Amino acid sequence: MTPLFARLTVAGVGLVGGSLAGAVRSARLAGEVVGFGRSAANLRVARERGLVDRATQDPAEAVADADAIVLAVPVGTCPALAERFRAHARAGTILTDVGSVKAGLVRALEARWSGVGPVVGAHPIAGSESTGAGAARAELFQGRRCILTPIPGTDPTALARVRALWEGVGARVEEMPPAVHDELLARASHLPHVVACALAAAVDGTQVDGRVVLDYAGSGFRDTTRIAGSPAELWRDIALANAPALVAALREFRAALDRLEGAIASDDAPALEAALTLAQAVRRRLGRTE
């Protein structure tokens, strides 16, 4: 079977990039998988775990003769990294990414990759708070959504190849405009992260009668704040890149929180029970799709 790509470069072999690299190798979707990154130690782990065939910190070596490059780094660093790769990539090289924000990023990558090759925005909805090549696992994308965000003028052949890449590692692929993606993910992904961070910060250092609140945190607090353990650099970039949609989502959340507070403060048991029952039903529906 002929590989989908003769050479695939994955820039950033952390949880998502490393998992993709390992899945591509396992499925033999590329003749060679090259890993690129800043950390020699992380690249060594990626190589030792067999996630990549080769690993390098040299941008020229990383993208030489690559058919496609996957940017698996924080969204704020993607445009500058594309600029670094530009001088060393061969004509026709596909540039794609795994970023959680799409509209501004796709525009920036199109501008920096113009004259080199096609750009295809992609976002696999999979991950955890774990980081680094040591956390990567080839099955991460099995049965998970991956959203492609083509724009008018996106090369159809490149789009089909990127779709085949994600389907090849087990993802369920769908397409939508970048702006629609950003509005959806602001509420389904970015808002929950900000809320988890706010909850963690709200009790940090808080004491009651000399007792530290965090010492009494149970599974509910731990479950609710789990994603706050994700890399701050990554989520800083996501929040700022999707600020308008995220701010709107935060206002919607604040209104819902105000309604709960009002019901509690006014001892309105029926209103409070209705809100809690609705939340329970939503969670049950979500559980059926996990």
Image: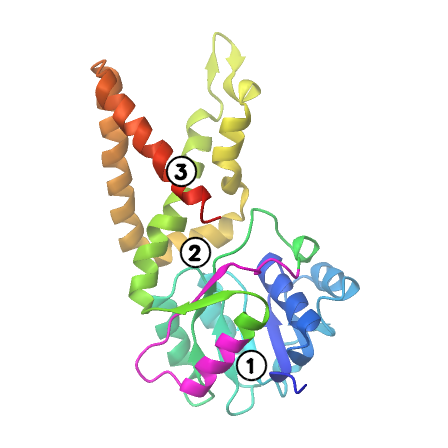
What separation in Å lies between label 3 and label 2 (alpha carbons)? 28 Å
Q: Position of residue 241 (x, y in %)?
A: 36, 59
Q: Nearer the viewer, residue 186 or 105?
A: 186
- The furthest residue to the front: 288
Asked if the magenta segment contains residue 149, the reply would be: yes
At a point 54% along the width and 41% down the height, the residue shown is 229
Mark 3 or mark 1, whichever is nearer to me: 3
Label 1 crowd (10 A; few <14 / some 14-19 / many >=20): many
Q: Secondary structure at mark 2?
A: helix
What separation in Å lies between label 3 and label 1 (alpha carbons)? 39 Å
At a point 44% along the width and 51% down the height, the residue shown is 236
Q: What is the tally of numbered marks visible in this picture?
A: 3
Q: Which residues are magenta?
A: 138-164
Query: Which residue matches tag 2?
Result: 237
- The furthest residue to the right: 48
What separation in Å lies between label 1 and label 2 (alpha carbons)? 24 Å
At a point 50% along the width and 40% down the height, the residue shown is 228
